[in-house]
Image (cartoon, rainbow, N blue to C red):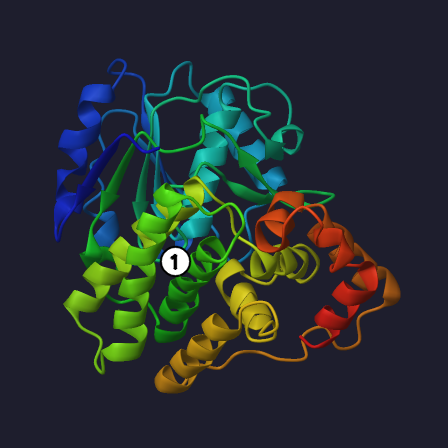
Amino acid sequence: MVSKVVFGRGCFSATKDIIEPQRKNPDAPFIFLVDDVFKERTSLISRIPLSGNDKIMFVSSDLEPKTSVVDKISADLKNSFDSISGIIGIGGGSMLDMAKAVDLMLTNPGSSTDYQGWDLVKNPGIYHVGIPTLAGTGAEVSRTTVLSGPERKLGMNSDYTPFHQIVLDPELIKNAPVNQRFYTGMDCYIHCIESLTGTYLNAFSKSYGDKALELCEEVFLEKDDWDDDSDDKLMMASYHGGMSIAYSQVGVAHAISYGLSFLLGTKHGIGNCIVFDQIEEFYPAGVKKFKAMVDKHQIHIPKNICAGLSDQEFEKMIDVALFLEPLWENALGKNWRDTITRKKLRSMYEKM
């Protein structure tokens, strides 16, 4: 679990005071990995507290985080600096995952592909901080960093993955595009539905999941206008949703959407929406409310993205989805293979 959390409007300004005590020496920099969408937005960049050899690295989030990019950034940093004080990730879920992965690869040998799985990371990373500029993914609190590798999309799930500190400033998510805000917010909503209806459910995950779901429904169903209060609540929904799956798991939507992301490059949030829109048989009540949210906010959910795929491409998506056994077990129990066959998955992907 993340050991230190700061929440509040304007708390980004406290970043310097938060990280400076962790500086190893005057020559050991903090590396700020920042979503390159902010490259021209000086209102944020000018507030990043640089000192000494500190460095901003802009990283594209146009595609899901890739193991090849993680390996290159971490190798470049190790070649450039004898010592690094910490990694600070600033951006949406993809950038936070990138920061967590780069951090771990600074202290673990080989490629990040070697650590895609559960509890494969052997060495703790260095000090790392997450500062989200979108709310919903839960990446700021999760023990995984989801990466697309040569063979699969799968997280580096480890007790060493979570940030040491997160800075939750709702002002940073204020100007997110409407569609992007919705897709990311729905990632949180879907986390909750999958966690609260799963076989792994326990009192810890239920307490956080109930609160996250309540906040999501208040923001996306009950409120008519988006305001500062909506941003505050969505940021806390993201936090609670991430905490909910820390001791449980996600389910059908995430397992299937990983296949879409791996083959088609579909971004995580919108991929979950595309899938969730079609799986009412597994989550009837949750999907019904999801569709009501889509209608209320007039959001476009892409369809027919799998049209024209070859048999080989369908098979690859199915391989990726079936590899995520804990997700299927959480959703359907230990006998999930009785329901989820390759034929069943093919028919589901053909609807999307």
Residue 290 at x, y = what percent?
44, 75
Residue type of the residue flagged with mark 1: Val
Front residue of 33/168: it is 168
The residue at 68%/57% (across/down) is 259
Furthest toward the right, the residue is 311
Residue 106 against residue 229 in the figure, above or below = above
**Which quadrant of the view contains residue 289?**
bottom left
Q: Which quadrant, please, contains the N terminus?
A: top left
Check disc 1 and report the residue beneath it.
37
In this rendering, does residue 134 appear at all? no
Residue 174 relative to residue 285: left or right: left
In this rendering, does residue 36 appear at all? yes
Circle 1 — which element?
helix
The residue at 62%/34% (across/down) is 117
Residue 249 relative to residue 259: left or right: left
Front residue of 39/255: it is 255
Residue 171 against residue 202 in the figure, above or below = below
Front residue of 118/289: it is 289
Residue 255 at x, y = what percent?
62, 55
